[in-house]
Amino acid sequence: MLSTLFRKRLTDEQLATVFVNGVLDVTGNGFKEVVELIKYDAAFVTTPHLDETKDGHFIMIVIVGNLSKLDEVFEADEVGKLEEAIIERFSDAFQMTKVEFKRYLSEYRSFMSRVNHPSKNMHYAMSKAFFHKYGLNEYQDEYFKEMVNPNPLFLKRMDEVMESFFWNWEAFFKRFKIA
């Protein structure tokens, strides 16, 4: 009870910094585990060759997924300000201008929307984007390879994996409140 009374207050800028650092930390540490899970997934007839150091696509997929969820947590006017602060922090982290990062982010959003069409489910979009960006089609059996679509069993498992890369706002708001 006392912990909810004495939650630390954060500004939008502080929240953006915590969010960006958290996303970068979880993706940096989690990518190797995701690669290991994929290497041993039964949906592939040959073992996928993924470089554990090539996590750039994965990071962007997770960023897009998390940014898409902001409107489920915050009011519309808050989302705009918060997203701008987050984009500024990510652009700094990636040593890009804000304009460059926005363009890059827009390209990933568009790509994820295309590979996930007509679904609007972000879990599917993240899983399908990972599948395509990391060239996993070539490791599937002929049926799915010809369709250029992920095996639904792999997709289901990947959706569960991607779930763990969404920011846990419920836990966050137990410790912090927005000023």
Image (cartoon, grey):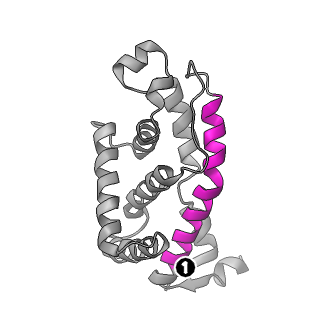
Q: Amino acid at mark 1?
A: Lys
Please name whichever residue, 123 or 58, is drawn nearer the observer in this view of the structure: 58
Q: Residue at x 40, y 76 (%)?
A: 88
32 in the magenta segment: yes
Which residues, given as a range, are shown in magenta?
15-40
Vertical arrangement, residue 89 with respect to residue 141, above or below: below
Q: Which quadrant of the rendered structure holds the N terminus?
A: bottom right
Please say if 151 is above or below 106: above
In front of the other: 169 or 45: 45
Residue extending furthest right? 2
The x and y percentages for residue 79 are 36, 71
**What residue is disc 1 on?**
177
Q: Residues within 10 Å of mark 1 (few under 14, many from 20)?
A: some
The overriding secondary structure of the stretch rendered in magenta is helix
Dividing the picture into quadrants, the one containing residue 23 is bottom right
Say whether residue 177 is magenta.
Answer: no
Q: Residue at x 59, y 51 (%)?
A: 53
Image quadrant assignment for residue 118: top left
State the image coordinates of residue 21 (x, y, percent, origin top left). 57, 70
Give the quadrant of residue 34: top right
- Residue 30 is situated, as x and y percent measured from the top left of the image, at 63, 51
Mark 1 falls on what kind of element?
A: strand
